[in-house]
Image (tube, grey):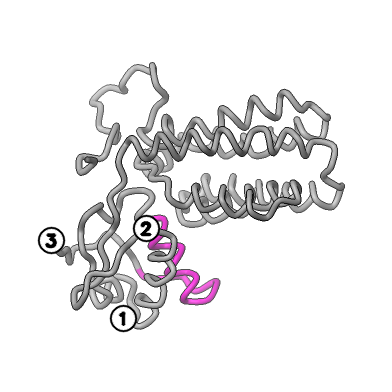
């Protein structure tokens, strides 16, 4: 199945066109704006962005490497399907890796490192407030990658980033539209507060809760056990999930 009615808008070229297209497409896939299993052509995507197909094809090559799309010969690119079981497994691996890694760098981040991380955390907060989903996801990725870089283990940081990119979070757009993502965004500053105080256990606990959002709040629009808001219109799960 191909699709021509694509929920994308013209680009704002504050960064390179290729990078902007990559971030926009990545956010559209992660949030579910581009549907799993659907084939999108470079000309159709380029038309939605207001650009030629060439930079879209270049961007799709990068997203293919990340496992978000696959090439369909003579047609375009299909958004890869990912099951709930696979998402659970990704979250489980991240919980095994990231909370202990971040706990162990408490006391190792220099003052200028905290200044850089604070700036990245603020970018996340501002993107949430400005309802900038691509900006939110990019800043979130950069923040966590930089934080994990203090482990000195590049393989761990790369793996965690790769797993983060593969996660689908269909509740994010709803949360952002309703102004409900601000609390999650602020957790990035709270994590740094704990680290600066030398609270290793508190850092571990917050990081665990933060990653848990990927299969709760960010995935569905609410945490497990929460009552469904009146009308129940937020995305609890993707209908195409197999």
Which of the pair 200/73 is nearer the observer? 73
Q: CA distance from mark 2 to mark 1?
A: 19 Å
On screen, 207 above or below 126?
Answer: above
Q: Which percent across, then down, holds residue 122?
A: 65, 48
Q: Secondary structure at mark 3?
A: loop
Q: Which percent across, then down, holds residue 158?
A: 59, 54
On screen, 138 above or below 192?
Answer: below
On screen, 83 above or below 38?
Answer: above
Residue 171 vs residue 205: left or right?
left
The quadrant where residue 203 appears: top right
Give the labeled residue for mark 3: 1
Q: Earlier in the sequence, mark 3 or mark 2?
A: 3
Q: Secondary structure at mark 2?
A: loop
Q: Are marks 1 and 3 in contact (CB under 8 Å)?
A: no
Task: Give the foreground label among 1 and 3.
Answer: 3
Q: Secondary structure at mark 1?
A: helix
Residue 222 vs residue 233: left or right?
right
Give the labeled residue for mark 2: 68
Count of numbered badges drawn on the protein: 3
Q: Are marks 2 and 1 in contact (CB under 8 Å)?
A: no
What stretch of residues is rendered in magenta? 10-27
Query: Looking at the image, which residue is at 68% across and 47% down?
Result: 148
Where the N terminus falls, by quadrant? Answer: bottom left
Where the C terminus falls, by quadrant? Answer: top left
Q: CA distance from mark 3 to mark 2?
A: 17 Å
Tell me the tag on residue 53. Answer: 1
Residue 168 vs residue 235: left or right?
right
The quadrant where residue 184 appears: top right
Which of the pair 104/141 is nearer the observer? 104
């Amino acid at each position: 199945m191909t699709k021509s009615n694509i929920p994308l808008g013209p680009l704002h070229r504050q960064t390179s066109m290729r990078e902007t297209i990559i971030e926009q497409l990545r956010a559209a896939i992660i949030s579910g704006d581009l549907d799993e299993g659907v084939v999108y052509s470079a000309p159709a995507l380029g038309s939605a962005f207001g650009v030629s197909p060439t930079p879209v094809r270049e961007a799709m090559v990068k997203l293919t490497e990340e496992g978000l799309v696959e090439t369909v010969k003579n047609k375009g690119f299909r958004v890869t399907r990912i099951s709930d079981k696979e998402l659970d497994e990704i979250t489980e691996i991240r919980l095994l890796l990231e909370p202990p890694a971040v706990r162990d760098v408490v006391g190792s981040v220099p003052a200028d490192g905290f200044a850089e991380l604070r700036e990245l955390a603020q970018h996340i907060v501002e993107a949430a407030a400005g309802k900038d989903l691509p900006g939110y996801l990019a800043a979130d990725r950069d923040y966590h990658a930089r934080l994990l870089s203090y482990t000195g283990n590049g393989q761990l940081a790369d793996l965690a980033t790769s797993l983060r990119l593969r996660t689908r979070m269909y509740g994010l757009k709803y949360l952002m539209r309703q102004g409900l993502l601000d609390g999650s965004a602020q957790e990035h500053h709270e994590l740094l507060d704990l680290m600066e105080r030398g609270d290793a256990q508190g850092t571990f606990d917050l990081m665990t809760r933060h990653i848990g959002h990927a299969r709760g709040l960010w995935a569905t629009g609410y945490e497990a056990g929460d009552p469904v808001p009146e009308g129940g219109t937020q995305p609890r799960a993707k209908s195409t999930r197999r």
